[in-house]
Amino acid sequence: MEDIASGLIPEEEQLLINLLGKVTPKNMTAGVFNAVAKIFRLPAIELVCLRLGASARTEVLLSQRPADDPIFPGQWHTSGTIARLSDASPFDSLKRLAKKELGITLDLSALSFTGICYSNHNRGGEIHIIYVYVFYGNAPDNHQFFPIDNLPQPFMEHHHAIIKLTMERFQKI
């Protein structure tokens, strides 16, 4: 394994170790998270919500990052979250995500595992653990449904692979 601390003198390495020892999941800032994310491949739990829209076209639920987002400005994406130490399983991550982002209580029995894929992007690397959920009703606040074959731009590049895997699985449901 490549030495993560290569380029640091021993005193700098020890300072980094001491400073990281002060960071907890509850006090980690976005800046610290983004710096650490560039070093490791983090587990991202993805919830791809689909529905049949007008003319029986498959639609995907998306949200758009703010224009001033430092990593993915203004980009559209499916719902996802980085797994936290407090999550005992991917299902805990999914329930937290559904409640926080979508304002819904997730019916875990309605989930289907889609697959796993890796990505590298502006923030770093991720292992995407993907689930598909058939959504009924209107889009929650700050979300929109789009036909799967007509995604809005700008769109997070690595989410194309997530949607592709999901659609391959969804065709078998």
Image (cartoon, helix red, strand yellow):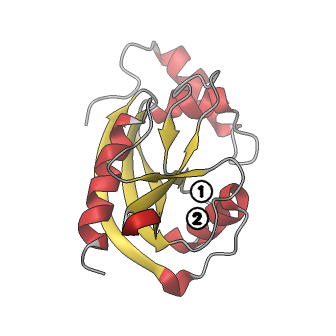
Relative horizontal placement of residue 55, taking residue 106 as reference (left or right): left
Residues at badges 2 and 1 in contact (C-beta under 8 Å)? Answer: yes
Can you tell which mark lies on residue 84?
1
Does any portion of residue 108 appear in the rendered image? yes
Q: For the residues marked 2 and 1, what is the alpha-carbon distance in whole angstroms?
A: 7 Å
Q: Position of residue 66 (x, y in %)?
A: 64, 30
Relative horizontal placement of residue 8, taking residue 14 as reference (left or right): left
Does any portion of residue 18 appear in the rendered image? no
Q: Secondary structure at mark 1?
A: loop
Name the residue that disc number 2 marks. Answer: 93
Residue toward you, 104 or 17:
104
Q: Position of residue 83 (x, y in %)?
A: 54, 57
The amino acid sitting under disc 1 is Arg
Q: Position of residue 121 (x, y in %)?
A: 37, 31
Can you tell which mark lies on residue 134?
none
Which mark is first along the chain, 1 or 2? 1
Residue toward you, 66 or 143:
143
Q: Is residue 135 above or below residue 71?
A: below
Name the residue at the front extreme.
Answer: 55
Estimate how packed mark 1 is, as few (under 14), some (14 to 19) or many (20 or more) residues with alpha carbons within 10 Å.
some
Q: Secondary structure at mark 2?
A: helix
Residue toward you, 170 or 22:
170
Which quadrant holds residue 173?
Answer: bottom left
Q: Is residue 131 above or below residue 25?
A: below
Residue toward you, 163 or 148:
148
Estimate how packed mark 2 is, as few (under 14), some (14 to 19) or many (20 or more) residues with alpha carbons within 10 Å.
many
Name the residue at the bottom extreme.
Answer: 109
Which quadrant holds residue 34?
Answer: top right
Q: Position of residue 20 (x, y in %)?
A: 62, 34
Task: Give the residue drawn at x 53%, y 26%.
Answer: 71
The N terminus sits in image quarter: top left
